Amino acid sequence: MSTLFLTFIVLSAVAILLFLVLKLKVSAFIALLLVSIYVGILTGMPLNSITKSIQEGMAGTLGFVATVVGLGAIFGQMLESSGGAESLAHYLVKKFGKERAPWAMVLTGFLVGIPIFLDVAFIILVPIVYALSRDTKKSLLYYAIPLLAGLAVTHSFIPPTPGPIAVADIIGVPLGWVIFMGFILGAPTAIIAGPVFGKFISKKIHLESPYSLDDVPQEFDPKNFPSFRSIAIIISIPLLLILLNTLTSVLVAKGTVPKSVFTDVLEFIGHPFSALIIATLIATYFLCLRRGMDKQKVLDLSTKALGPAGIIILITGAGGVLKQVLIDSGIGQMMAESMANSALPPILLAWIISAVVRVTQGSATVAMITAASIIAPIIGEFGLNDPQRALVVISIASGATLLSHVNDSGFWLVGKYLGMNEKQTLQSWTVMETIIAFCGLGLTLLASLFF
């Protein structure tokens, strides 16, 4: 196949996906499956081979993603339902003081965004933003933008949130490296998009709380919040165990540490499955059952958590199907060979694909999965090591935050809770998301010089 035909296949596949989702309102799950069949037919695959690729792609992807995303959803639900997010926020604001509260809010968002979905975490924590704005007479954006930046960065960059888990699995990189790169590159990104930009935009747009604090429902009594220390420890457990597994695997592979029963145990408990099972059980017991929550309610919360997780799992599986079709059709290898002489590095190409899908259809998760599915066969031919693949994951995550606008549910959620019109939301939330996208890309390209 010629380079021109390969380009046509990829661009037409993305265009059809966007047409199905935006114009015909077809679910992303079905749209990805239809696009996979389209690519298979266009590249000349036998029909029975296409169906076999669909089965293998779905099975190969869901074996890992379904388990991790399901456990991560329950883990986050336990933290959310116990009042853990508010506990973190209140403690950090108290320690930082009201003058440095934006730094407390970005740190709160950065930590809370790891186990809890962005929209849920924002709704839970926005009353604290209202209270700070009321007490200091500063614009809501002075505190809201840092909180949102922290939430947005970890939501996209750091597992166990579904996006980076799905991308890491499709590309084939250990989660430990994604967590490490996510923290290293995510922290400065959150600072620039959060406290720095928040201070600037709050001087341009002054917002007061759109609600009286008496109108904001308080689900938890602040006196009954779990302690900051317990929340911080529980959030860190899966991250540290996964990082320990990655470190142990690297040391054993290099021969620095001999393989033994001890290293096998470390690798086992640090596997994402084991790490999240341990963390979920600890969170369920110490944050819920031990604090008097009814067992039936714990069960109901676990079931509730799996609802949104199920949608993400199926979309991720469909992304795995597209990846498998690209591999089985041979187009992935041909694209890689075609790209070998291209001036575009894989990191930049991945960012561009993710950004285009994000801007046109709105969903960051769909953008990440689509970009990962397209780039995965190419990455396989470039012989990238694990740290380099992890940087590709962060690049895709960065592109998927670009230019959130009216086709993104987050745009309307933030505007509603902060009492902004569309223009103000574009000037604040949209610009903040775009800063994250470009900072993430720039820092990823910089980091690629050292790995």
Image (cartoon, rainbow, N blue to C red):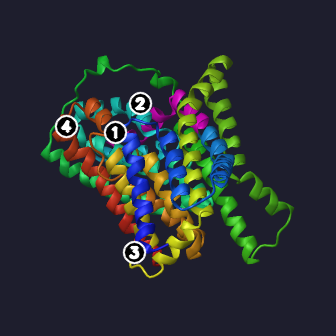
- Using the rendered image of the protein, determine whether residue 68 is visible from the camera's viewpoint: yes
* Front position in the image: 187 or 179: 179
The answer to whether residue 187 is above or below residue 58 is: below
SS class of the residue under badge 3? Answer: loop
Residue type, mark 1 in image: Lys
- Magenta span contains residue 399: no
- Residue 422's label in the rendered image is 4
The answer to whether residue 248 is above or below residue 451 is: above
- Magenta span contains residue 96: yes
Along the horizontal axis of the image, is 54 left or right of 432? right
Characterize the magenta stretch by its predominant secondary structure.
helix
Q: Which residue is mark 3?
A: 344
Report the mark closest to the observer, 1 or 3: 1
**Residues under labels 1 and 3: Cα distance?**
31 Å
Q: Which residue is mark 2?
A: 124
**Residues under labels 3 and 4: Cα distance?**
35 Å
Along the horizontal axis of the image, is 259 left or right of 103? right
Disc 2 and disc 1 in contact, CB within 8 angstroms: no
Q: Position of residue 96 (x, y in %)?
A: 36, 46
Q: Earlier in the sequence, mark 2 or mark 1?
A: 1
> Label 1: few (<14), some or many (≥20) within 10 Å?
few
* Front position in the image: 434 or 344: 344
Q: Earlier in the sequence, mark 2 or mark 3?
A: 2
Q: Which residue is mark 1?
A: 23
